Image (cartoon, grey):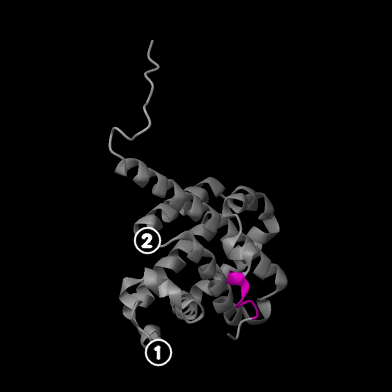
Amino acid sequence: MGCAISGLAAKPEFAERNLEDAAAGAAARLSDDQIQIIKDSWKVIRDDIAKVGIIMFVRLFETHPECKDVFFLFRDVEDLERLRTSRELRAHGLRVMSFIEKSVARLDQLERLEALAVELGKSHYHYNAPPKYYGYVGAEFICAVQPILKDRWTAEVEEAWKTLFQFVTGLMRQGYLEESARQRHLALSPKERPEKKNTAL
């Protein structure tokens, strides 16, 4: 697909690995050097965030057409050119890029980043967007920003962004599963709910 890592999302270690482990461990693996690399590269990327958002989602629908099922507005759009000029897709791309910008801004405050990503995962439960798709977006983001960074793109830059996306998607998955469990609990009738024992003396 024109990107050296277009198969990345399909690799188990990126999209389908046990992302709960990734969430627990990635913070330790995101070194100070990687945080600085991400911040420095973001300064260049952010000048083109609308363009990156569009490229990212057009590529996503091209490489993983099943993802369109999650997006009601784009479900039946076969013409990729129509997607490239879609105001709705541009708006959604900008929302995703805004989340990435917030993530970068919180790299020095990991608790705030964790809370943000878990909440996003919970909201994706209500959008009916399951965790299996989250890693695909990270892979397409990486492909979309390579041409923007040009000769600044290195193996270290790629590894830093991959680590960040593994961390964030792991937390999103955690939020999705928490919300799924909460909704299942709420759906049970009072008789079916596990009894809360009265511990008052």
Near-viewer residue (194 or 43): 194
Give the crowd class for mark 2: few <14, some 14-19, many >=20 residues within 10 Å.
few
Q: List the residue tagged with mark 1.
A: 81
Which residue does the image show at 33% across and 81% down from the upper left?
76
Q: Which type of secondary structure does the marked residue at label 2 adopt?
A: loop
Residue on which the image places disc 2 = 128
The x, y position of residue 148, in whole percent, is: 57, 80
Q: Which residues are magenta?
A: 4-10
Q: Earlier in the sequence, mark 2 or mark 1?
A: 1
Is residue 8 part of the magenta span, yes or no?
yes
- Which amino acid is tagged 2? Asn
Tell me what residue is drawn at x 59 percent, y 71 percent.
10
141 over 86 or under it: above or below: above
Quadrant, the C terminus: top left
> What is the three-letter code of the residue carrying label 1?
Glu
User: From the viewer's perspective, is 24 left or right of 63?
Assistant: right
